[in-house]
Each structure stands twice: as structure tokens, then as C-alpha cells.
């Protein structure tokens, strides 16, 4: 391997290693800020700013700079705002490492080599290879910019490359890789495209799998939205991509997602043609070779549904009719509305599927707006048993899919959560270790902290109930067979009713 | 050219090693001032690339110590720093601001050393 490829490979590895460690670095920094150790925080934030930028995470570096400035003349609100921005940036940073990721080098002999000139274009090396083509690194000396050059793997595939070029030429959208020119060199086509920097979603999925990290709901909605926007442009151009999958999506800087490889894209007038898509992501009618003219976009929507499922669950759906209920079994934090959208994409019968990428965008937009509204309601569950925490989270999320649930394992932890953020409603188990739930409720009343509470217990005495009422807690749910329904009803009464009459406030 | 690199962040150390070695530097690395002091007991480097913000003894203290020691006084120091302001120290020939472009690090080091002569 040439020395510069070795260097690029090593830099990409280091960048990835740093991106994976960054959440822990940010967590330590935020904890230091919140603990009030501002001198120590200044040292940490300087280091984070410099390192994140050097490792190709500019958004994280900028967020660190914001916090650095907030630390110069700190006010609690500014510090908290900067910390929140930093946490968002580190979450997004994992989605956008800007250093180029290494690609496997082709095993076939190439007819274009590093150093070859085609007019103003210079071939500089190999970026990677796919099923039909090889992607080369190039430089346009005329315009002074880097480009990517695609050539067919062999002469039998040159017509497909020409078709891909025409397909790309028909679409102009930031979410679709841009074709710059189709040249002929030594009688063979060379597709000149914009040079993208980032890594494919397939690489990113693999990196997440290694560290056991899941995609957050926000990340999944972001990726689905960006791809849907690109598909709107593709479909409006009268095309369908037909091979939508993680390796054909590039995550670029500034949270961009770019659709690549139109090698099997089909003009809708030829939509009945069977083409070689990737089986795991292919729609049933595509596998059966029965895509009706005009229904190519529905094939792309099905593939996008598979992609969304994979991002949330961490695995591809099993073959056959896909059950999206599996998503909720694996992820209690996923809103039902998102699962319903995936269900709409994954209908086996294309005529029952969401009708267009534009319709999908409307659905995703409604989901995001709903989540923003839902985030106005922050719930704190105070429960020491992990299985019970999961049950409570599932019941409350089902009662109000847009709600944001925090969990504290003890009364002491609950007090810390209440100190650092607004909580609109608490569900408190009375049988907590050390400081009991009842003591927590009484403490909050004594401290004049007004948070509506649903108390839960498996063995509360009449005396406990009396004390709860005295503390202004009117919603009590006994653990037992009716618990889910009773908790849902109590939650809804508290949310809908005048909280001042039902909360801790006397 | 022999270069002693002092930085507490492992990925940053590795990154500097990789890009500087690719440009022909002979790099010795230290994760903190104590490790750097051990390294300096051997043959002296031609330049020290020193991270300013490190836990424990920071880069300034080490630069002061190098300047105070007759044996190391002449070794030029380049500071790696994300802060906008740095103290003026006689043995410091310049600073490289973080974030920096990895592939330009060697060039920046050479340029700063060239200004010294």
C-alpha cells in the first residue's frame, strides 16, 4: 500500500478512536462544570476544543469553544446552555467524522493509474470499489479542486456507468452526489463526481456495533429525513435508486447524508426491469422481479424502512413480512409514531405503503414537532428496581409517546436530577432504599418544591396514604394486576387536570 | 531531526507521531512531564513539541524547567495549545494552535524552527 494511503488509513483510525472516546470526555467536562470546578473545566475544554478540531470533528470543537467563552464570565444559564450544546454536538459528532475512512483496495487490474492525466484531471489513487465500479481519487487542475472518478470494473459494465452518469446528471440536490462530467478516455467512460469526505453509514453502523452503542431516536429521524429529502429529488427526476442501503449513504460534515451509487438506478419508464439490488434491503416486489411501472419510488421507500429498522434495532429484520412490533420490544424509548411510520414503509403490498418520499417527510416532520412539544413534559421515575424502571418507562411512554422519561434509582439521585433540570411530574416508588419515597415527597413539600407526584407502592399502609394526602399527593397507584391501567389513568388525570390542586402543593 | 513530543492525550500523541514520522522526524513521545524528563536524560532532541494543557505539571512549568537547566536551555520548544494567549518564554520559538491540520504539522514545525535561525 502506498505510504500516503497508510497515513490516511492511520489518521482515519485515530479519528474514529477519538470520536468514540469523545462522549466520555464531554461527560467528564459537563460533570466538572456542573460541580462548579470551573478552573479544571477550563483546562478540559481547551483540550477538547483543540483535539476535536484536529481529529475532524469541527462541530464538537465549536461547541467546546462556546463553553470556553461561557466559562470566561459564567452565569448558570449560559453554562447549562453551553453544556447542553456540547452534549448535542458530541452525539452528532459520532455521525460525522470528517476524515476519510479507509476503503478496501481493488483486487482487479485498473486501466487508470495514479499519475494518469485526462485533460485537466489527474488520477491520484484509489478510494474504493463497489460491485460495478471502482472509485478513484482525482484532482482537477483547471478548477483547483479534488474530485472522485468512477470507472467500470470491466468493459461489460461500461453501459451501466453511462446510465448512472445520466441518472446523476438528472438530479441536483445536496443529498445526492453530484455528477460533474462524463468523459471518455481510451474509449472507456470516466464519471467525474464531486469528492465527498466522510464515511458511509455502513462503516458507521459497524463502528457503533463494536462499541455496543445504539442510534438515538433523534439520529434515526435525522438520517431518515435527510434520505427522504434526497429521494424526493430523485423521484421528481423520474428515477428510482433501487439500491438504497447503508453502504450507499455517506455521512458528511455538518450532519449531511448523501446518497451515492446510482449504478442500478432506473428511469421510471423502464421500471419493470429487474436489476441487482441488495437482497436484505430489497422490497418484496423487487425480489420477485414484479415492480410495476411508476412504482419504483415505493421500492426505495421500502429499503428506507429496512434501514430505519436496522438503525433502531441494531439488526436487519428477518426475511419475509417484517414485524415492526419488534422495534418496541427492543427499544422502549422509540415513540409509537416512529414505529408506525416504519410500518407504513415496510408494507409488503406496495399499494398499501406510504405513497411517496414527500408523504414520508410530512410524517417525519409531524413526529419531530410532536417530540418537541412532548419534550416540554419531563418525567422523573424514582424507582430502585431496574425491571420496574423498564416497566414504568414502557407504561408512561405508551400513555404519552412524546414524553421524555428520566430515571433515578434513589431519592438522593432524584434530588440531584431536580437540582439540575426542570421536572414536570414524578412517579415515586415509596419503598426506596435509604431515603424512602415518602420521605422524598415530604422533603420536597418542606422545601417548597412543587412537582406533581404519582406515588406507587406494593405495600403502602393506611398511615402512608394519609401522610401522602397531607403532602398533597392525591394520586396513589398500588402495584398489582391493574397497575398499568391504573398508572396510565393517574398519569393522564395529573397531566390534564390543574396540577396545583394535585401536586405536592398543599 | 529528533523531536520530543509531550502530550497527555493518547490519540493526539499517536496522531503527531504518525504524521511527523511520515515526514522523516525521529519522534520520542512522553505522556507527561515526568516521562519527558526521563527522555531528556538521553541524547537531547532538536526540538520539543509540548502540549500546554496537561494535568499535573503543565507545559509552562516544563518549559521553565528546561530553560533553567544549562543542559537543555538551548533546546527550542514549540507549544501546542488551544488557548489564544500564551506567556512569553525565551526558549519557546512559537506555538501551533489546536486544532491544526494533521498533514500540515511537520511543515509548521519546520517553519517555526526556520524563524529561529
Image (cartoon, coloured by chain):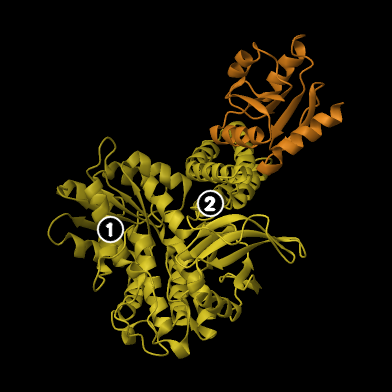
Which residue is farthest front? A186
- Name the chain letter of the residue that bears numbered label 2: A
Instruction: Determine crowd level at label 2: few under 14, some 14-19, many 20+ residues with C-alpha closer than 10 A.
Output: many
Which residue is farthest top? B70
**What is the letter of the orange chain?**
B
**Vertical side of A74 occupied by A188: above or below:** below
**Vertical side of A292 occupied by A479: above or below:** above
Q: Seen in the image, is A430 located left or right of residue A423?
A: left
Do the residues at pointers 2 and 1 share their chain? yes
Instruction: Determine crowd level at label 1: few under 14, some 14-19, many 20+ residues with C-alpha closer than 10 A.
Output: few
Residue A413 position, x and y percent, is 37, 41
- Name the chain letter of the residue that bears numbered label 1: A
Q: Quadrant of residue A400?
A: bottom left
Q: Seen in the image, is B27 located left or right of residue A236?
A: right
Which residue is farthest left? A481
Q: Is residue B100 visible?
A: no
Q: Quadrant of residue A478?
A: bottom left
Q: Which residue is mark 2?
A: A101
Residue A489 position, x and y percent, is 24, 66
Residue A458 position, x and y percent, is 16, 49
Which image quarter holds the C terminus of chain A? bottom left
Name the residue located 40 percent from the left edge and 77 percent from the top edge.
Answer: A301
Q: Which residue is mark 1?
A: A330
Q: Colour of chain A?
A: yellow
Amino acid at each position: 500500500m502506498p505510504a500516503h494511503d497508510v497515513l490516511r488509513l492511520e489518521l482515519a483510525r485515530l479519528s474514529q478512536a477519538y470520536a468514540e472516546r469523545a462522549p466520555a470526555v464531554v461527560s467528564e467536562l459537563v460533570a466538572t462544570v456542573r460541580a462548579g470546578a470551573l478552573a479544571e473545566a477550563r483546562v478540559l475544554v481547551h483540550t477538547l476544543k483543540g483535539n476535536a478540531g484536529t481529529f475532524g470533528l469541527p462541530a464538537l470543537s465549536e461547541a467546546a469553544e462556546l463553553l470556553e467563552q461561557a466559562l470566561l464570565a459564567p452565569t448558570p444559564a449560559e453554562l447549562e446552555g453551553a453544556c447542553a450544546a456540547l452534549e448535542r454536538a458530541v452525539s452528532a459528532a459520532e455521525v460525522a467524522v470528517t476524515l476519510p475512512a479507509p476503503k478496501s483496495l481493488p483486487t482487479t487490474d485498473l486501466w487508470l493509474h495514479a499519475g494518469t492525466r485526462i485533460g485537466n484531471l489527474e488520477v491520484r489513487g484509489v478510494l474504493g470499489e463497489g460491485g460495478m465500479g471502482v472509485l478513484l481519487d482525482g484532482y482537477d487542475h483547471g478548477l483547483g479542486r479534488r474530485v472522485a472518478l468512477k470507472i467500470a470494473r470491466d468493459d461489460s459494465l461500461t453501459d451501466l456507468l453511462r446510465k448512472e452518469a445520466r441518472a446523476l446528471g438528472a438530479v441536483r440536490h445536496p443529498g445526492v452526489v453530484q455528477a460533474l462530467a462524463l468523459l471518455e478516455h481510451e474509449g472507456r467512460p470516466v464519471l467525474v463526481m464531486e469528492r465527498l469526505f466522510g464515511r458511509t453509514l455502513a462503516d458507521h453502523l459497524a463502528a457503533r456495533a463494536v462499541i455496543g452503542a445504539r442510534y438515538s431516536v433523534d439520529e434515526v429521524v435525522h438520517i431518515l429525513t435527510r434520505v427522504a429529502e434526497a429521494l424526493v429529488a430523485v423521484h421528481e427526476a423520474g428515477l428510482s435508486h433501487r439500491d438504497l442501503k447503508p453502504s450507499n449513504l455517506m455521512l458528511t460534515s455538518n450532519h449531511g447524508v448523501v446518497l451515492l451509487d446510482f449504478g442500478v438506478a432506473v428511469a421510471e419508464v423502464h421500471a419493470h426491469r429487474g436489476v441487482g439490488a441488495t437482497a436484505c434491503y430489497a422490497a418484496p416486489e423487487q425480489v420477485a422481479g414484479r415492480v410495476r411501472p411508476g412504482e419504483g419510488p415505493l421500492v426505495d421507500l421500502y429499503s428506507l424502512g429496512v434501514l430505519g429498522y436496522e438503525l433502531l434495532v441494531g439488526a436487519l429484520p428477518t426475511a419475509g413480512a417484517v414485524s415492526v412490533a419488534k422495534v418496541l420490544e427492543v427499544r422502549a424509548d422509540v415513540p409509537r409514531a416512529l414505529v408506525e411510520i416504519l410500518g407504513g414503509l415496510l408494507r409488503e403490498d406496495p399499494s398499501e405503503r406510504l405513497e411517496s418520499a414527500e408523504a414520508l417527510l410530512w410524517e417525519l416532520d409531524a413526529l419531530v414537532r410532536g417530540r418537541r412539544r412532548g419534550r416540554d413534559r419531563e418525567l422523573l421515575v424514582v424507582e430502585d428496581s431496574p425491571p420496574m424502571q423498564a416497566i414504568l418507562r414502557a407504561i408512561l411512554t405508551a400513555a404519552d409517546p412524546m414524553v421524555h422519561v428520566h430515571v433515578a434509582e434513589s431519592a438522593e439521585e432524584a434530588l440531584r436530577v431536580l437540582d439540575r433540570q426542570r421536572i414536570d411530574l414524578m412517579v415515586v416508588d415509596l419503598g426506596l432504599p435509604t431515603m424512602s419515597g415518602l420521605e422524598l415527597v415530604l422533603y420536597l413539600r418542606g422545601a417548597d418544591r412543587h412537582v406533581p407526584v404519582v406515588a406507587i407502592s406494593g405495600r403502602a399502609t393506611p398511615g402512608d396514604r394519609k401522610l401522602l394526602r397531607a403532602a398533597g399527593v392525591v394520586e396513589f397507584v398500588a402495584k398489582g394486576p391493574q397497575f398499568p391501567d391504573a398508572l396510565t389513568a393517574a398519569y393522564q388525570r395529573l397531566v390534564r387536570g390543574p396540577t396545583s390542586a394535585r401536586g405536592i402543593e398543599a | 531531526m529528533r523531536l520530543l513530543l509531550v502530550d497527555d492525550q493518547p490519540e493526539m500523541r499517536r496522531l503527531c507521531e504518525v504524521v511527523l514520522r511520515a515526514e522523516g522526524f525521529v519522534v520520542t513521545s512522553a505522556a507527561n512531564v515526568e516521562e519527558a524528563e526521563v527522555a531528556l536524560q538521553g541524547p537531547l532532541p532538536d526540538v520539543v513539541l509540548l502540549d500546554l494543557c496537561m494535568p499535573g505539571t503543565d507545559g509552562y512549568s516544563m518549559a521553565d524547567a528546561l530553560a533553567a537547566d544549562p543542559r537543555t536551555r538551548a533546546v527550542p520548544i514549540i507549544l501546542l495549545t488551544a488557548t489564544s494567549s500564551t506567556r512569553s518564554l525565551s526558549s519557546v520559538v512559537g506555538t501551533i494552535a489546536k486544532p491544526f491540520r494533521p498533514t500540515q504539522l511537520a511543515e509548521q514545525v519546520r517553519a517555526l524552527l526556520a524563524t529561529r535561525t
